[in-house]
Image (cartoon, rainbow, N blue to C red):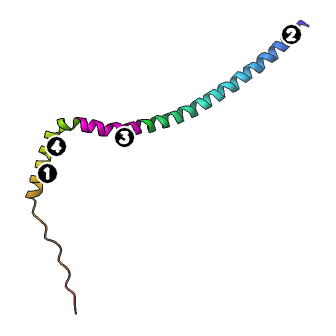
Amino acid sequence: MFELGILVLVVVGACWLFGALIAGLFKLTFGLIGALFGGVFALFAVGFAALLVVPIVLFALLPLMLPALCIAALVWLIVRASRPHADPPQAAPTAH
């Protein structure tokens, strides 16, 4: 009877170990899938938050950036004015 109890404990332990192995595989699989979906959602959320925050930050920094933007605009105007103007293309003469 003692040997039968030991045998039952070994069988139950083996089943328990096999179940724990299967449960671990499920946990690993669903954890990886959850991490993948979580990462995609996090990228989406960060992008959406950036779309909301970036214009507000740019408007907040506009007084600091205004002198540099004015200098850049002045340089652009000087460079544009100093270029020679290209003549507009002439229409090809037509034969009558």
The amino acid type of the residue labelled 4 equals: Leu
Residue 76: assigned label: 1
* Magenta stretch contains residue 48: yes
> How crowded is the residue under tag 3: few (<14 C-alpha within 10 Å), some, or many (20+)?
few
Q: Give the residue pinned by disc 2.
A: 5
State the image coordinates of residue 93 (x, y, percent, origin top left): 19, 85
Q: Give the residue pinned by disc 3.
A: 51
Residue 55 in the figure: left or right of residue 23: left
Q: Earlier in the sequence, mark 4 or mark 1?
A: 4
Q: Earlier in the sequence, mark 3 or mark 1?
A: 3
* Quarter-of-image position of residue 84: bottom left
* Magenta stretch contains residue 88: no
Q: Give the residue pinned by disc 4.
A: 69
Q: Earlier in the sequence, mark 3 or mark 4?
A: 3
Residue in front for this viewpoint, 55 or 46 = 55
The amino acid type of the residue labelled 3 equals: Leu
Separation of disc 1 and disc 2 at Cα? Answer: 92 Å
Residue in front for this viewpoint, 48 or 96 = 48
Name the secondary structure under disc 2.
helix
Q: Residue at x 86, y 10 (%)?
A: 5
Residue 4 in the figure: left or right of residue 67: right
Q: Is the stretch drawn in magenta largely helix, strand or loop?
A: helix
Separation of disc 2 and disc 4 at Cα? Answer: 86 Å
State the image coordinates of residue 51 (x, y, percent, origin top left): 36, 40
Q: Residue at x 58, y 29 (%)?
A: 31
Point out the residue furthest to the top here: 2
Between circles 2 and 4, the one closer to the viewer is 4
Separation of disc 3 and disc 4 at Cα? Answer: 22 Å
Between circles 4 and 1, the one closer to the viewer is 4
Separation of disc 3 and disc 1 at Cα? Answer: 29 Å
The amino acid type of the residue labelled 1 equals: Trp
Range drawn in magenta: 46-60
